[in-house]
Image (cartoon, grey):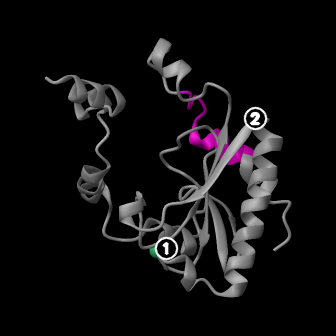
Amino acid sequence: MSKSSRLLNDIWPQERDVFVRPDRLKYVRRAAIPKTCVFCEAASTTQKKSKLVVYRSDAAMVVLNKYPYNNGHLLVLPTRHIGELEELSVDEFAEISLLVKESVRILKKVYTCKGLNVGLNLGAAAGAGIPDHMHYHVVPRWFGDTNFFPLIAETKLVVESLSTTYKKLSNEFKKLKK
Ligand SMILES: [Zn+2]
């Protein structure tokens, strides 16, 4: 190996080092995604708790992520089945934006998190797990939550059951006016 290619290997991690293949993820997820849209089911269900819906109005809703990155990981989305941000009506966009704001407020209150990630993955190429029904992620963060614990304890920091998370957060969302 030449000196320059060794240097390049030091700068650019090789696949064997990283084990992240976002280009393959779409195949893995496709196998796991049910035929019906889970978000549309959540939009119409009468069983809100079993579908993890903590808030729902005609236009928008807030649901728990079934596979949370962290305790309290919320998804904010339109009730309508649309994949593109620009397809949202002005009213839908306004309500979703307000719900993102309220989600941040509630997560800070309930989980006293030190920060949050708020974001959109639009399209499968951008990493969206369910690209046909767009959704914001609102993820509470604490210092060291992703790096420190998995390394020393081989444990994810998601220690709370979804039913506990549901109870805590739905109580807060109940206070919002529809
Ligand atoms: Zn849908």
Magenta includes 123? no
Is 50 in front, or is 115? 115
Using residue 82 as the reference point, say whether residue 72 is left or right of it: right
Residue at 68% x, 81% y is: 92
Q: Secondary structure at mark 2?
A: loop
| Residue that appears at 49% across and 73% down | 40
Quadrant where the C terminus is found in the figure: bottom right
Precedes in sequence: disc 2 or disc 1: 1
Q: Is residue 49 above or below residue 108?
A: below
The residue lying at 74 percent from left, 77 percent from top is 94
Q: Is 163 in the magenta?
A: yes
The answer to which quarter of the image holds residue 144 is top right
Identify the amino acid type marked 2. Lys
For image coordinates 44% across by 18% down, the residue present is 154
Among the 4 quarters of the image, the one containing residue 6: top left
Residues under labels 2 and 1: Cα distance? 32 Å
Instruction: Look at the image and give the residue range highlighted in magenta.
Output: 157-168
Q: Position of residue 107 (x, y in %)?
A: 75, 46
Disc number placed over residue 114 in the picture, else none: 2
